[in-house]
Amino acid sequence: MIQENISLKKYNTFGLNIKADRLITLRDEKNAARFLERNGEKAGKTLILGSGSNILFTDDFHGTVIHPDMGGITLEESTEDYVIVSAGAGVIWDDLVEITVSRGLGGLENLSYIPGTCGAAAVQNIGAYGCEAKDTITRVRALGMKDGLVREFLNSDCRFGYRDSIFKNELKGQYLITRVCFRLSARPSLNVGYGSLKEETGKMGAHSLENVRKAVINARKTKLPEPSQIGNAGSFFKNPVVSGSMADELKTKYPSMPLFSDPSGKMKIPAAWLIEKCGWKGKRIGDAGIYENHALVIVNHGKASGKELLDLSEKMIRSVHEEFGIILEREVQVI
Ligand code: EPU
């Protein structure tokens, strides 16, 4: 389906009423391959857009927006210990989590209620409560944007990192993800080590997949705003990772600073803490603001423009840099 001069308000969770020259929705892999084979070379400026839950538009998009909307959740393989499930790039992430949890399959429960689609989950390596999408992704199927040819990426080909993958770097804009395969446990062991997740799950009775999902949903609903009520894209910045020696120095100067060890051996500092310390939590400049319950979330109180939201983020970066000598990196993609 091709739409011209169309508003992307429904396609970005900041609720910005910007327009794209063209929006092309691709619903199945075969048609998508044919379309890219014929038009890929001459498509001009393009942007692949899932549900727009991690994007900030600062202006109208003069080019072609491609919206992958391949559906379907399929059981690919099943053993006594694990199953391989594949999901179309356009499947809503939390629908996949809900269905797999309800079938007693473990691996995605900590990632409950994250907005976005399954294709975007692989690009962004979404994460929460001690888990990341990369922990379960086995393969990513994609089409070359210029020729429509199918390519399969194994987990190790995807170069997953903290909210990062090859699809955001070396191969940015070069592949259209169509399906993602996940290896889920048929004998799940729960991962409730993050924060108060164990306690919250325990309060519900049994430590079960369903209860972990419920506890995660409760936690997210308490801390993070619903995009349908107040425009936002979840965490706006990544948590900065610093060397052990820099972490020691900062801790001496700011004894209450929380620090978490990172798998890289370095230390992770919650960006929310840094931002809150700089006095930004709950502040607003016009309709661009910082959420009152979580300092890492920039919100659109109604009529903020993309540029105003970006300006606010720049002010936050500057003040965190002045106070702590740390440069915050945006998690949200700015267009
Ligand atoms: N904190 C503050 N002020 C706040 C909020 C938090 O000081 O307003 C401090 C607290 O010390 C808290 C710490 O920050 O212990 C961490 O906060 P939280 O547990 O909410 O996690 P986060 O590091 O801010 C990350 C992810 C979230 C994910 C949560 C839970 C990033 C950039 N964000 O946030 O992911 O839901 O952990 O696992 O890594 C997202 O990526 O969009 C997202 C929401």
Image (cartoon, rainbow, N blue to C red):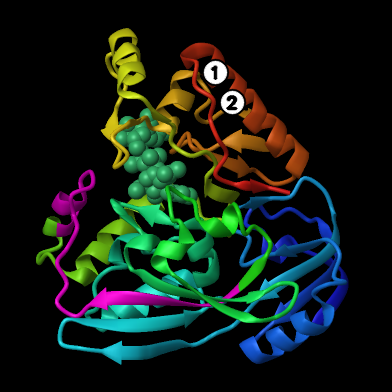
Q: Give the magenta-colored segment's residue range.
A: 177-201
- Tell me if residue 199 is in the magenta stretch: yes
Q: Is 35 colored magenta in this rendering? A: no
Q: Is residue 324 above or below residue 335?
A: above
Quadrant position of the N terminus in the picture: bottom right
| Labels 1 & 2 near each other (Cβ < 8 A) | yes
Determine the quadrant in which ligand 1 lies. Answer: top left
Q: Quadrant of residue 246?
A: top left
> Is residue 146 among the parts visible in the rendering?
yes
Choose between 274 and 171: the one closer to the eye: 171
Which residue position is annotated with label 1? 321
As drawn, the residue found furthest toward the top would be 253
Name the amino acid type tagged 2. Answer: Ile
SS class, disc 1? helix
| Picture coordinates of residue 207, whole percent (x, y) | 12, 64
Is label 2 in a helix, a strand or a loop?
helix
Read off the residue under disc 2.
317
